[in-house]
Image (cartoon, rainbow, N blue to C red):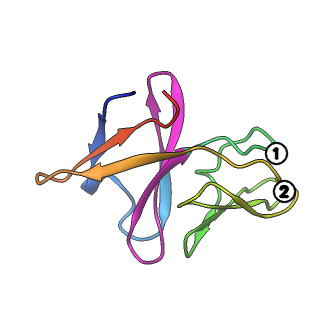
Amino acid sequence: MSTAVRVCSVDELPATVGAVVADIEGRRVAIARDSDGALHAFDDTCSHANVSLAEGEVEGRLIECWLHGSQFDMTTGQPTQLPATVPIAVHQLEVDDEGGVHVTLAGS
């Protein structure tokens, strides 16, 4: 099992909705804030078109790929809008008492 890696501080993330990319053990991971302010970590690459999801729009708990409009649920990784049909990996995210954002990679 993978161990948690400190990625950034909460202050380095978008104050409202949006996403940033982190490299964790050679894997591109998006860290996103949804419309309710909750934070999510998931693979940054769209399973349909192999482009960055962090560059897409966040609405509610969905992130939309900017290229073809595929949408993914950031809590489950499941695609909710075609053309994507393959889910993306979702990673465990925790915020420590000092505001540090830690991610544990799924499937490691």
Can you tell which quarter of the image residue 33 is in?
bottom left
Q: Which residues are magenta?
A: 21-42
Q: Image point 78% across, 47% down: which residue? A: 86
Under circle 2, the secondary element is loop
On screen, residue 66 versus residue 4, left or right, reads: right
Spot occupied by residue 90 in the image (x, y as percentages of width and height): 53, 48
The furthest residue to the front: 1
Residue 71 forms part of the magenta stretch: no
Q: Which residue is mark 2?
A: 68
> Is-magenta flag for residue 27?
yes
Q: Residue most toward the top?
A: 26
Q: Amino acid at mark 1?
A: His
Relative height, residue 107 to residue 53 (above, below): above
Q: Earlier in the sequence, mark 2 or mark 1?
A: 1
Hey, what amino acid is under mark 2? His
Where is residue 12? Give x, y as percent. Answer: 31, 51
